[in-house]
Amino acid sequence: MAHAVTPQSALDELISLGIAQPTWKLSPRGRVYSSYGKWELDDVDSDDSDDDDGNPTVFWTESIPGRHPEHPYSGFDADWVDGRFHDHAISLYEINESDGIEVSQARAIFTNPYITRGVDNATTARLQTLGMELWVDLDNPRLKWHLPGRGTVAACVYKELNPMPYETFKKTFRYFLVRHTILATTTQSTHLKPNVLPTTATQPHDLFFDMLVDSGHKSVRLGLDNETADQAWAGLSGRAYIDHATFDLLWALYRRGRRLWNRLRRFLKMRFVVYYWASLSARPDAAGNAPPGAIDAFRQEF
Protein backbone atom coordinates (compact mmCIF):
# COMPACT_ATOMS: atom_id res chain seq x y z
CA MET A 1 0.00 0.00 0.00
CA ALA A 2 1.44 3.36 -1.03
CA HIS A 3 1.99 5.96 1.66
CA ALA A 4 0.18 9.27 1.38
CA VAL A 5 2.28 12.11 0.05
CA THR A 6 2.54 15.00 2.49
CA PRO A 7 4.52 18.25 2.33
CA GLN A 8 7.03 16.72 4.78
CA SER A 9 7.45 13.50 2.78
CA ALA A 10 7.79 15.56 -0.41
CA LEU A 11 10.50 17.66 1.27
CA ASP A 12 12.28 14.46 2.35
CA GLU A 13 12.20 13.35 -1.29
CA LEU A 14 13.68 16.69 -2.41
CA ILE A 15 16.47 16.24 0.13
CA SER A 16 17.18 12.71 -1.09
CA LEU A 17 17.41 14.07 -4.67
CA GLY A 18 19.85 16.79 -3.61
CA ILE A 19 17.46 19.58 -4.58
CA ALA A 20 16.86 20.65 -0.97
CA GLN A 21 19.38 20.78 1.84
CA PRO A 22 19.03 18.53 4.92
CA THR A 23 18.78 21.67 7.09
CA TRP A 24 15.68 22.96 5.31
CA LYS A 25 12.35 22.73 7.08
CA LEU A 26 8.72 23.45 6.34
CA SER A 27 7.44 26.91 7.23
CA PRO A 28 7.51 27.38 11.01
CA ARG A 29 4.11 27.86 12.66
CA GLY A 30 2.41 27.49 9.27
CA ARG A 31 3.63 30.88 8.09
CA VAL A 32 2.89 31.81 4.48
CA TYR A 33 5.86 33.08 2.45
CA SER A 34 6.13 36.86 2.37
CA SER A 35 8.40 38.99 0.21
CA TYR A 36 9.09 41.22 3.24
CA GLY A 37 10.86 40.65 6.55
CA LYS A 38 8.66 39.86 9.53
CA TRP A 39 9.15 39.58 13.27
CA GLU A 40 7.06 38.70 16.27
CA LEU A 41 7.47 37.94 19.93
CA ASP A 42 6.95 34.53 21.46
CA ASP A 43 3.43 34.48 22.82
CA VAL A 44 4.11 31.54 25.12
CA ASP A 45 4.63 32.47 28.77
CA SER A 46 7.47 30.10 29.55
CA ASP A 47 10.97 30.31 30.97
CA ASP A 48 12.16 28.31 27.95
CA SER A 49 11.04 31.11 25.65
CA ASP A 50 13.30 33.71 27.27
CA ASP A 51 16.91 34.57 26.52
CA ASP A 52 19.65 34.88 29.16
CA ASP A 53 18.46 38.38 30.08
CA GLY A 54 14.86 37.29 30.59
CA ASN A 55 13.67 38.84 27.32
CA PRO A 56 11.11 36.88 25.29
CA THR A 57 12.38 35.08 22.22
CA VAL A 58 11.96 37.06 19.02
CA PHE A 59 11.00 35.19 15.86
CA TRP A 60 12.55 36.85 12.82
CA THR A 61 11.65 35.68 9.29
CA GLU A 62 13.78 36.57 6.28
CA SER A 63 12.35 36.34 2.79
CA ILE A 64 14.50 35.44 -0.19
CA PRO A 65 16.31 38.73 -0.99
CA GLY A 66 14.88 40.55 -4.01
CA ARG A 67 16.89 41.85 -6.95
CA HIS A 68 14.17 43.44 -9.06
CA PRO A 69 15.20 46.97 -10.19
CA GLU A 70 11.58 48.18 -10.12
CA HIS A 71 10.95 46.77 -6.63
CA PRO A 72 14.09 47.71 -4.67
CA TYR A 73 12.54 47.15 -1.23
CA SER A 74 10.86 43.80 -1.90
CA GLY A 75 12.14 40.30 -1.40
CA PHE A 76 11.80 37.79 -4.23
CA ASP A 77 8.26 37.46 -5.56
CA ALA A 78 7.44 34.51 -7.82
CA ASP A 79 4.94 36.71 -9.67
CA TRP A 80 7.92 38.52 -11.22
CA VAL A 81 8.30 35.56 -13.61
CA ASP A 82 5.97 33.16 -15.44
CA GLY A 83 3.11 32.66 -12.98
CA ARG A 84 2.14 29.23 -14.27
CA PHE A 85 4.90 27.66 -12.14
CA HIS A 86 3.66 29.32 -8.95
CA ASP A 87 0.54 27.57 -7.71
CA HIS A 88 -0.17 25.69 -4.46
CA ALA A 89 3.00 26.94 -2.78
CA ILE A 90 4.72 26.13 0.49
CA SER A 91 7.94 27.74 1.69
CA LEU A 92 11.07 26.06 2.99
CA TYR A 93 13.28 27.63 5.65
CA GLU A 94 16.58 27.22 7.41
CA ILE A 95 16.11 27.96 11.10
CA ASN A 96 18.81 29.01 13.58
CA GLU A 97 18.79 30.71 16.96
CA SER A 98 21.18 32.94 18.91
CA ASP A 99 20.94 36.10 21.06
CA GLY A 100 17.36 35.18 21.92
CA ILE A 101 16.40 35.48 18.24
CA GLU A 102 15.10 32.59 16.15
CA VAL A 103 15.92 33.41 12.54
CA SER A 104 14.01 31.65 9.76
CA GLN A 105 15.69 32.29 6.41
CA ALA A 106 13.53 31.43 3.40
CA ARG A 107 15.52 29.07 1.20
CA ALA A 108 12.99 27.92 -1.37
CA ILE A 109 9.40 28.05 -2.60
CA PHE A 110 8.04 24.57 -3.33
CA THR A 111 4.98 24.50 -5.61
CA ASN A 112 2.63 21.96 -7.16
CA PRO A 113 1.19 23.74 -10.21
CA TYR A 114 -0.96 22.35 -13.03
CA ILE A 115 1.61 22.22 -15.83
CA THR A 116 2.58 19.64 -18.43
CA ARG A 117 5.92 21.02 -19.65
CA GLY A 118 9.13 22.17 -18.06
CA VAL A 119 10.71 25.56 -17.65
CA ASP A 120 11.57 27.43 -20.86
CA ASN A 121 14.84 29.23 -21.60
CA ALA A 122 13.32 32.70 -21.31
CA THR A 123 12.03 32.00 -17.79
CA THR A 124 15.38 30.49 -16.80
CA ALA A 125 17.22 33.58 -18.02
CA ARG A 126 14.75 35.90 -16.27
CA LEU A 127 15.19 34.06 -12.99
CA GLN A 128 18.97 34.22 -13.27
CA THR A 129 18.83 38.01 -13.49
CA LEU A 130 16.95 37.85 -10.17
CA GLY A 131 19.58 35.59 -8.59
CA MET A 132 17.24 32.59 -8.73
CA GLU A 133 16.81 29.21 -10.39
CA LEU A 134 13.78 27.01 -10.98
CA TRP A 135 13.82 23.22 -10.84
CA VAL A 136 10.88 21.33 -12.37
CA ASP A 137 9.86 17.66 -12.19
CA LEU A 138 6.77 16.51 -14.08
CA ASP A 139 6.73 12.83 -13.21
CA ASN A 140 7.85 11.99 -9.66
CA PRO A 141 4.69 11.06 -7.70
CA ARG A 142 6.50 11.40 -4.36
CA LEU A 143 6.72 15.17 -4.91
CA LYS A 144 3.02 15.73 -5.60
CA TRP A 145 1.81 16.71 -2.15
CA HIS A 146 -1.10 18.85 -3.41
CA LEU A 147 -3.04 16.22 -5.35
CA PRO A 148 -1.30 12.86 -4.96
CA GLY A 149 -1.81 10.60 -7.96
CA ARG A 150 -2.82 13.39 -10.34
CA GLY A 151 -0.51 13.38 -13.35
CA THR A 152 -1.26 17.00 -14.27
CA VAL A 153 0.38 18.27 -11.09
CA ALA A 154 4.13 18.92 -11.26
CA ALA A 155 6.76 19.83 -8.68
CA CYS A 156 8.64 23.13 -8.92
CA VAL A 157 11.27 24.58 -6.61
CA TYR A 158 12.37 28.21 -6.71
CA LYS A 159 15.67 28.74 -4.90
CA GLU A 160 18.51 31.25 -4.67
CA LEU A 161 21.66 30.72 -6.69
CA ASN A 162 23.89 32.03 -3.87
CA PRO A 163 22.00 32.06 -0.57
CA MET A 164 23.42 33.99 2.38
CA PRO A 165 24.67 31.67 5.15
CA TYR A 166 23.29 32.29 8.61
CA GLU A 167 26.70 33.23 10.03
CA THR A 168 27.05 35.86 7.30
CA PHE A 169 23.57 37.21 8.03
CA LYS A 170 24.61 37.72 11.67
CA LYS A 171 27.31 40.13 10.47
CA THR A 172 24.83 42.48 8.76
CA PHE A 173 23.55 45.80 10.06
CA ARG A 174 20.09 44.29 9.73
CA TYR A 175 20.80 41.64 12.36
CA PHE A 176 22.50 44.20 14.59
CA LEU A 177 19.35 46.32 14.48
CA VAL A 178 17.04 43.38 15.19
CA ARG A 179 19.24 42.42 18.16
CA HIS A 180 19.10 45.91 19.66
CA THR A 181 15.43 46.71 19.04
CA ILE A 182 12.30 46.11 21.12
CA LEU A 183 9.25 45.21 19.08
CA ALA A 184 6.10 47.30 19.41
CA THR A 185 3.42 46.21 21.88
CA THR A 186 -0.10 47.47 22.57
CA THR A 187 1.34 50.10 24.90
CA GLN A 188 4.52 51.26 23.15
CA SER A 189 5.96 51.66 19.67
CA THR A 190 9.06 49.95 18.31
CA HIS A 191 12.24 51.44 19.79
CA LEU A 192 15.86 50.72 20.58
CA LYS A 193 16.70 48.83 23.75
CA PRO A 194 17.81 50.91 26.75
CA ASN A 195 21.39 52.23 26.75
CA VAL A 196 22.05 51.44 23.09
CA LEU A 197 22.46 55.16 22.41
CA PRO A 198 23.54 57.90 24.84
CA THR A 199 20.65 59.65 26.57
CA THR A 200 21.69 62.87 24.83
CA ALA A 201 21.15 61.36 21.37
CA THR A 202 17.92 61.83 19.46
CA GLN A 203 16.17 58.48 19.33
CA PRO A 204 15.00 57.16 15.93
CA HIS A 205 11.34 57.59 15.04
CA ASP A 206 9.43 54.32 15.26
CA LEU A 207 8.91 54.40 11.48
CA PHE A 208 12.67 54.05 11.08
CA PHE A 209 12.34 50.40 12.04
CA ASP A 210 10.07 49.77 9.08
CA MET A 211 13.31 49.47 7.12
CA LEU A 212 13.65 46.01 8.65
CA VAL A 213 10.82 44.70 6.48
CA ASP A 214 12.73 45.97 3.43
CA SER A 215 14.05 42.76 1.86
CA GLY A 216 15.81 44.13 -1.19
CA HIS A 217 19.21 42.51 -1.76
CA LYS A 218 21.16 45.70 -0.97
CA SER A 219 19.29 46.34 2.27
CA VAL A 220 19.74 42.79 3.50
CA ARG A 221 23.48 42.92 2.76
CA LEU A 222 24.05 46.34 4.33
CA GLY A 223 27.32 46.28 6.24
CA LEU A 224 28.94 43.33 4.50
CA ASP A 225 30.85 45.42 1.97
CA ASN A 226 32.74 47.50 4.55
CA GLU A 227 30.67 50.59 3.80
CA THR A 228 31.48 53.83 5.56
CA ALA A 229 28.75 55.57 7.55
CA ASP A 230 28.21 58.04 4.70
CA GLN A 231 27.94 55.24 2.13
CA ALA A 232 25.44 53.39 4.30
CA TRP A 233 23.44 56.58 4.89
CA ALA A 234 23.22 57.29 1.15
CA GLY A 235 21.38 54.02 0.50
CA LEU A 236 19.37 53.86 3.73
CA SER A 237 15.65 53.35 3.12
CA GLY A 238 14.64 54.70 6.55
CA ARG A 239 16.81 57.81 6.72
CA ALA A 240 13.80 60.15 6.74
CA TYR A 241 13.05 58.89 10.25
CA ILE A 242 16.44 59.16 11.95
CA ASP A 243 18.87 62.04 12.46
CA HIS A 244 22.08 61.71 10.50
CA ALA A 245 24.11 62.09 13.68
CA THR A 246 22.09 59.38 15.41
CA PHE A 247 22.62 57.00 12.53
CA ASP A 248 26.37 57.71 12.64
CA LEU A 249 26.34 56.65 16.30
CA LEU A 250 24.45 53.45 15.51
CA TRP A 251 26.78 52.65 12.64
CA ALA A 252 29.82 53.21 14.85
CA LEU A 253 28.38 50.81 17.46
CA TYR A 254 27.70 48.23 14.77
CA ARG A 255 31.21 48.57 13.33
CA ARG A 256 32.80 48.39 16.78
CA GLY A 257 31.06 45.09 17.43
CA ARG A 258 32.34 43.71 14.12
CA ARG A 259 35.91 44.82 14.94
CA LEU A 260 35.81 43.31 18.44
CA TRP A 261 34.59 39.99 17.05
CA ASN A 262 37.31 39.95 14.37
CA ARG A 263 39.96 40.65 17.01
CA LEU A 264 38.61 37.88 19.24
CA ARG A 265 38.57 35.46 16.32
CA ARG A 266 42.20 36.25 15.45
CA PHE A 267 43.19 35.88 19.13
CA LEU A 268 41.51 32.48 19.42
CA LYS A 269 43.09 31.33 16.18
CA MET A 270 46.55 32.33 17.42
CA ARG A 271 46.02 30.50 20.72
CA PHE A 272 44.92 27.41 18.84
CA VAL A 273 48.09 27.49 16.74
CA VAL A 274 50.26 27.91 19.86
CA TYR A 275 48.54 25.03 21.65
CA TYR A 276 48.82 22.86 18.55
CA TRP A 277 52.60 23.34 18.23
CA ALA A 278 53.02 22.92 21.98
CA SER A 279 51.20 19.61 21.79
CA LEU A 280 53.49 18.49 18.95
CA SER A 281 56.60 19.37 20.93
CA ALA A 282 55.34 17.31 23.87
CA ARG A 283 54.81 14.12 21.87
CA PRO A 284 57.32 11.21 21.81
CA ASP A 285 59.38 10.87 18.64
CA ALA A 286 58.94 8.07 16.08
CA ALA A 287 61.14 5.75 18.18
CA GLY A 288 59.04 6.29 21.28
CA ASN A 289 61.59 8.52 23.06
CA ALA A 290 60.30 11.27 25.33
CA PRO A 291 60.76 14.85 24.06
CA PRO A 292 64.04 16.52 25.13
CA GLY A 293 62.23 19.13 27.20
CA ALA A 294 60.50 16.45 29.25
CA ILE A 295 63.79 14.62 29.85
CA ASP A 296 65.51 17.83 31.06
CA ALA A 297 62.61 18.61 33.38
CA PHE A 298 62.78 15.08 34.83
CA ARG A 299 66.52 15.42 35.49
CA GLN A 300 66.07 18.80 37.19
CA GLU A 301 63.31 17.42 39.40
CA PHE A 302 65.16 14.27 40.47
Image: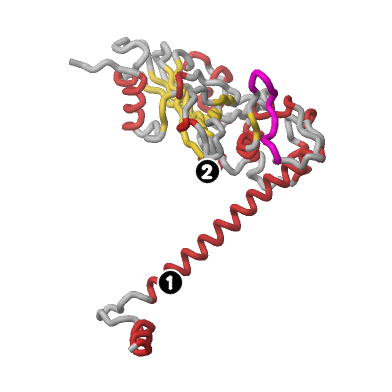
Expressed as whole percent of the image width and height from the top left, the position of residue 250 reads 73, 41
Question: Quick one: 54 or 25, which is closer to the camera?
Answer: 54
Question: Quick one: 66 or 197, which is closer to the camera?
Answer: 197
Magenta segment boundaries in residue numbering: 185-195
SS of the residue under disc 1: helix
The answer to whether 270 appears left or right of 135 in the picture is right
User: What is the CA distance from the residue labelled 1 to the residue labelled 2?
Assistant: 29 Å
Residue that carries the numbered disc 1 in the rendered image: 277
Residue projecting furthest to the left: 1
Answer yes or no: is residue 231 visible: no
The amino acid type of the residue labelled 1 equals Trp
Expressed as whole percent of the image width and height from the top left, the position of residue 128 reads 54, 31
Expressed as whole percent of the image width and height from the top left, the position of residue 251 reads 72, 43
SS of the residue under disc 2: helix
Q: Is residue 190 magenta?
A: yes
The answer to whether 295 appears left or right of 228 in the picture is left
* x 51%, y 35%: residue: 161
* 105 in relation to 139, above or below: below
Answer yes or no: is residue 79 visible: yes
Please tell me how crowded label 1 is: few (under 14), some (14-19), or many (20+) other residues with Cα within 10 Å. few
Q: How is the image coloured?
A: secondary structure
Instruction: Give residue 167's mark.
Output: 2
* x 39%, y 20%: residue: 155
Identify the main secondary structure in magenta. Answer: loop
